[in-house]
Amino acid sequence: MIYPEPISRLIESLQKLPGVGPKTAQRFALFLLSLPRDQVVAIARSMVDARDKTRYCRICGNFSDDETCTVCRDKRRDNTVICVVQDSRDVLAMERTREYKGLYHVLGGAISPMDGIGPEQLRMRELLERIKKGRAREVILATNPNVEGEATALYVARVLKPLGLKVTRIAHGLPVGGDLEYADEVTLSRALEGRRDV
Amino acid sequence: MIYPEPISRLIESLQKLPGVGPKTAQRFALFLLSLPRDQVVAIARSMVDARDKTRYCRICGNFSDDETCTVCRDKRRDNTVICVVQDSRDVLAMERTREYKGLYHVLGGAISPMDGIGPEQLRMRELLERIKKGRAREVILATNPNVEGEATALYVARVLKPLGLKVTRIAHGLPVGGDLEYADEVTLSRALEGRRDV
């Protein structure tokens, strides 16, 4: 005996979610079956709704509820600084710091030849146009501190430098609250390299 | 800045899934947004489909694609033995052993006063009727080996004993491939208690 067809199809489709294997998918599926019908419909509808109603800012590529996002619309933001990130998620992380007052540019990924993602797949052209037309004087590269993110940062820096902008990269070092003893050697040597006067 | 409304609603509704917190829900949501629309629709539809098309066996309460399930329909199964389990999932687990040839009865849960589940919420009446009308001579109690499962097994045993049936409980002991050293003391004392001649 196996699951009836509608259930096994559900289990299969839930396995598309990131980090969800057969066991978790089965758990999700049986949970969904135990819910009242209207709640299942609500979850299903919220998926399609989010897909249909989410728009992307024409300027920075961030999630948006309108043609331009709340950050780009905000006149109080400093339009001389653009922070380049991989994802909309990273915009949220930056915003949580409450420190950054400039604008963003969402690349939509990182250069990764293994996955067939080159500069053409990223929103590079939009970034160049923005910089040529806009008032940006500094570009902060805030791509992830891993191989793909570093390669992307290097690439963007190389493209932007000739335009006479200040191009900076966010600092690498020990995370606050971390433990020196447990820091990996690459992070630690980056933290040493980036030491500052106190 | 927070997520646009359709996305935050999706994140909220995904958090209803068991074991999914805000971070995982956010990861799922952003993944769904990155999929082509038809794939999102397919996942959403499989949820509602499973909910709508899944039926429960009129006899044993197991998942079914028809009025009665494949086990109850199968004439080769031994109808003198009924294995009582909490969930349809447990039927699948039992079937995977390929050892059990009898029928099942799915209670639909376990007695748990904390969650307001008493014997009335379980499929007890259906079990009693089945036993009175059917040819069962043995009932195997295969509820989970935890507090709720044990309480349920005790309760079912007490109700069925007066009917003159053989009522058995699956054995507790060391899991095969396990390590004596790491067994908890309750399991180990149950394993001792249930020792058999070799």
Image: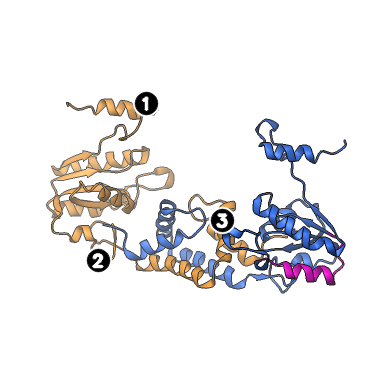
Chain colours: A blue, B orange
Is residue A124 magenta-colored? yes
Placement of the N terminus of chain A among the 4 image quadrants: bottom left
Q: CA distance from mark 1 to mark 3?
A: 38 Å
* Residue A29 falls left or right of residue B32: left
Q: Earlier in the sequence, mark 3 or mark 2?
A: 3
User: Which mark's residue is nearer the viewer, 3 or 2?
Assistant: 3
Is residue A133 magenta-colored? yes
Tell me where the magenta segment starts and ends, as one range. Answer: A122-138
Pinpoint the chain carrying mark 2.
B
Q: Amino acid at mark 1?
A: Glu
For label 3, the residue is B25
CB under 8 Å between callouts 1 and 3?
no
- Residue A190, numbered label: none
Viewer-closest of B191 and B147: B191
Examine the rendered structure and indicate whether residue B190 appears above or below residue B68.
above
* Residue A177 falls left or right of residue A36: right
Quarter of the figure with residue A3: bottom left
* Residue A39 falls left or right of residue B159: right
Placement of the C terminus of chain A among the 4 image quadrants: top right
Packing grade of label 3 (10 A; few <14, some 14-19, many >=20) is many
